[in-house]
Amino acid sequence: MTHPNNNAPKVQEEDDHTLHHDVDDEPVAANRRLFEGGLLKFVTLLAIAYSAFHLYTLNVSPMETWSFRIVHIAGALVLGFCFYAGARFVSGAEGPARHRWTTWFGAVMLLPVAYALYQTGVFYQMMADGAQRIPAALESSHFGWPLLVATGSGIVLSWFHQRERSRFSVPDLVLILCSIAVAAYFLVIYNTPLRMSTGTPFSPVGISFAAVAGTALIMEMTRRVAGIALVAIAMIFLGYVFLGPYLPSFLDYPGMSVKRFFGQVYTGAGVLGPTTAVSSTYIILFIIFAAFLQASKVGDYFVNFAFAAAGKSRGGPAKVSIFASGLMGMINGTSAGNVVSTGSLTIPLMKRVGYNSRSAGAVEAAASTGGQIMPPIMGAGAFIMAEITGIPYTEIAIAAIIPAVLYFLSVYFMVDFEAAKTGMRGMREDELPSFRRLVKQVYLFIPIIILIVALFQGYSVIRAGTLATVSAAVVSWFSPHKMGIRSILKALELASIMSIQIIVVCAAAGVIVGVISLTGVGARFSTLLLDIAAASDLLALVFAMCISILLGMGMPTSAAYAVAASVVAPGLVQLGIEPLTAHFFVFYFAVVSAITPPVALASYAAAGISGANAMQTSVSSFRVGIAAFIVPFMFFYNGALLMNADAVEIARAMVTAILGVYLLSGGVMGWFGQARASWLPRVILIGSALLMIEGGLITDLIGITLGAAMFLLQRQRRLQAAVA
């Protein structure tokens, strides 16, 4: 296993002017272990086996649904505790280890978890011998309590266990065995008639013990790979389960016991529900596809192609960022991850041509976030929406085209106006890849084309994704980066490592979805939304927007949408909004939470590369991506933007919407008609853009008239300034 590098951008110019940059390398997190020797080989084999298991199960020999999802989550936890430490690594000055007592205590905790794991084998044998159920005392004393003691102790010990980066952790070994014990118990119980008793007073008590331990393991792994934000949100929801009866107003509900709640949270209503259903099929498959593209260096080609196509125009690297991040982002499950991969090249180049650090980071964050709304993959969002709503995938992908075009055009206009306003140059010919040479390798787009064609030909998502993955390997044989057995194994290994974060986060989101489903808080929110809508539909939409952004903060796209869809979308549907429109509305705001202050993960990642202040970068990226906050209201008022009309109406809506985002960009950036705009023209431009939201003929005409008037006024000012 080769270790990727996330340091300074690697730019090298050869005779053909191809920029070689490892945008495909997975960045190394600060708490990621880098093993050596035999341990490296062992974890590499584990990672390869995990990806291969999914390909085999999805395409050759399917497993029972819940069993497959249980193994899917357990595998991610095992790999996660292998690769990601719970505390910082020691520095060279501190020696090889600190807090050595954690190793000894961890070794002691191996005893109860080993005993709990042994008991799962005993339970399996009992059920195989014809037992109808397992005695509650046996489950509690010999499985449940030992498992909880080991899980809790292992988590706490891992917070203090500090070792060198290449060494493994005994407390994490405890957590790995706990993850296996949880999965083994559920596999035993859920493959017997006892599965039907979940959620009833007759359910085995061991289910609750295993669910508590499993939830704690998921939260700890989420903290390690995605930060504390999602964990905090999940803990608030979990607190609501037991504090709800004491809360006022519409939040009040009868309450649930610990046994009843955790007896159901590890079912299709929670952790094993929609979020894990998508991560175990569509998301893991497209991560493998992305890993194959990375191993064949297609990602490098995407970036180089974007530089060759747009690098010469003013502010060229910023426009390259839009194209490259859109291409990479649609197959990347996180906006922040996309920022790190493409931004390490585009941000320094933006600064070279005149962008300040804050603006360079903001453009990259906004562009990478836009990749999550780019069809046909939409960062797996299209497949999650299809899973939740039952709307055909092809209908969702087609509906996403115009909104995505509007978003990227808006970012393009923002970038172009700022470049014109500050007099930025493009890149020189000798700084760019050779377009003529890159055109000869245009066949590297074939895997993406095969994926799109297969999906629209009616192939299942799994079959289409597998075909695209295989085609990525085949196409590489005609490129300088041919994929042999070693490269394929490296791709499988990389896919497993890339998938850990998104799988664990989806499982954590499943806990939140379970709370929403089991407590009925989503229905209470729908009632509140209906009450607000009685006063104003617009006010209800603004409220829904704020909740979607709030719930999405700190989460990858798929998890953010899944949670927001559970809370907000049902209320919007009850308002009479079409399900497709309601879910797109929620999806867009869940996505843009990545650039919305104060918790803007994509902006923070960009600020880390650019060297700018994180909060200032998030404010700037919010401004650059402001169209994403307007477009959902546009397709709410005008369904033609989601292809829900005849061809003439769709064309008119698209043209006026493009004019609207053009005027909005001019007003926000203070540049229009090749001249700086003072505060009054800017206000009028923004007002004229907002008039085009409703999509009515009269409001469109008024908006166009005002925009034309401002154009003529700005042109007159420019001519007067030239004469003076």
Image: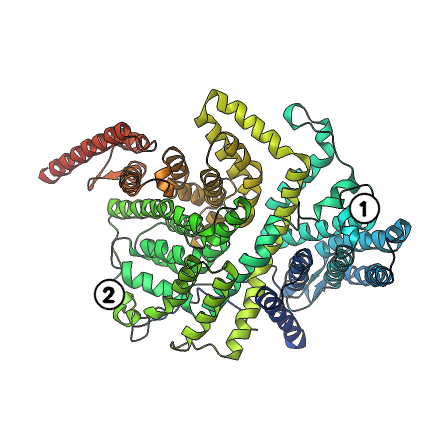
Mark 2: secondary structure: helix
Kind of residue at badge 2: Glu
Q: Position of residue 566 (x, y in %)?
A: 58, 40
Numbered badge on residue 203: 1
Label count reads: 2
Query: Would residue 61 be visible to someone looking at this image?
Result: yes
For the residues labelled 2 and 1, the Cα–Cα distance comes to 70 Å
What residue is disc 2 on?
429
* Residue at the top extreme, as displayed: 535
Mark 1: secondary structure: loop
Residue pictured at 73% horizontal, 54% vertical: 155
Quick one: label 2, few (<14), some, or many (20+) residues within 10 Å?
Answer: few
Q: Position of residue 188 (x, y in %)?
A: 78, 58
Q: Position of residue 310 (x, y in %)?
A: 28, 58
Name the residue nearer the viewer: 460 or 593: 460
Q: Position of residue 393 (x, y in %)?
A: 47, 51
Quick one: label 1, few (<14), some, or many (20+) residues within 10 Å?
Answer: many
